[in-house]
């Protein structure tokens, strides 16, 4: 991985989750979709532009080095290229959220307790737990509107002795 970064503005809880999982600067696994997206849209710094600089609102993401686009020269993302990377990060977050919380009927605890625990596990400030809950419900509702029920209909029954 190169020492060059791009700086992407992410929602605070997505930033916390991503940094907790992949470090700061964020280094995506080699050959990941996120690195492919960065590689596709990274360009040489235009003469009329200044290099990106870190700000408190942005997340540093390492630019993957490659033979065809060495990060030393290809280290600038256009505003729309940054949006593409932001969308990749958001998608990865949603996949992790659903994969790990998915069917809440399997859990033997209150939903908010599970969400608090999920936030703690992933380094997300508890202040965002309600936002995470809303995202979880929205995912489930979007599928339900299309007739896809992601929740189990029956609970496992223990045999009576």
Image (tube, rainbow, N blue to C red):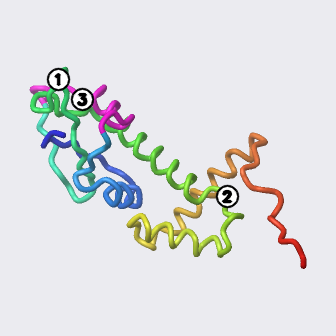
- Which structural element holds mark 3? strand
Q: Is residue 35 magenta?
A: yes
Relative to 130, say whether 144 is above or below. Answer: above
Relative to 60, say whether 80 is above or below. Answer: above
User: What's drawn in magenta, residue-wise?
Assistant: 30-48
- Name the one closer to the observer, 117 or 145: 117
According to the picture, the residue beneath numbered tag 3 turns out to be 42
Q: Is residue 148 left or right of residue 113?
A: right
Q: Residue 153 location in percent, x, y?
A: 82, 57
3D distance between C-alphas at marks 2 and 3: 38 Å
Quarter of the image with the C terminus in it: bottom right
According to the picture, the residue beneath numbered tag 2 turns out to be 103
- Badge 3 crowding class, 10 Å Cα cut-off, few under 14, some 14 to 19, many 20 or more, is many
Which is nearer the N-term, disc 3 or disc 1?
A: 3
- Name the one closer to the observer, 18 or 31: 31
Residue 67 circle label:
1
């Amino acid at each position: 991985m190169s020492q060059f970064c791009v700086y992407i503005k992410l929602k605070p809880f997505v930033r916390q989750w991503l940094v907790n999982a992949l470090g700061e600067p964020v280094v995506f696994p080699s050959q990941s979709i996120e690195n492919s997206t960065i590689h596709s849209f990274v360009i040489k710094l235009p003469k009329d532009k200044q290099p990106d600089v870190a700000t408190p609102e942005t997340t540093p993401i390492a630019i993957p080095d490659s033979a065809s686009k060495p990060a030393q020269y290809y280290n600038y993302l256009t505003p729309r290229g940054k949006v593409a990377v932001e969308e990749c990060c958001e998608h990865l977050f949603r996949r992790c959220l659903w994969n790990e919380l998915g069917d809440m009927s399997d859990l033997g605890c209150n939903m908010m307790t599970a969400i608090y625990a999920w936030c703690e596990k992933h380094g997300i400030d508890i202040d965002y737990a309600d936002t995470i809950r809303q995202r979880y419900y929205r995912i489930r509702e979007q599928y339900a509107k299309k007739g896809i029920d992601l929740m189990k209909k029956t609970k496992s029954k223990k045999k009576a002795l």
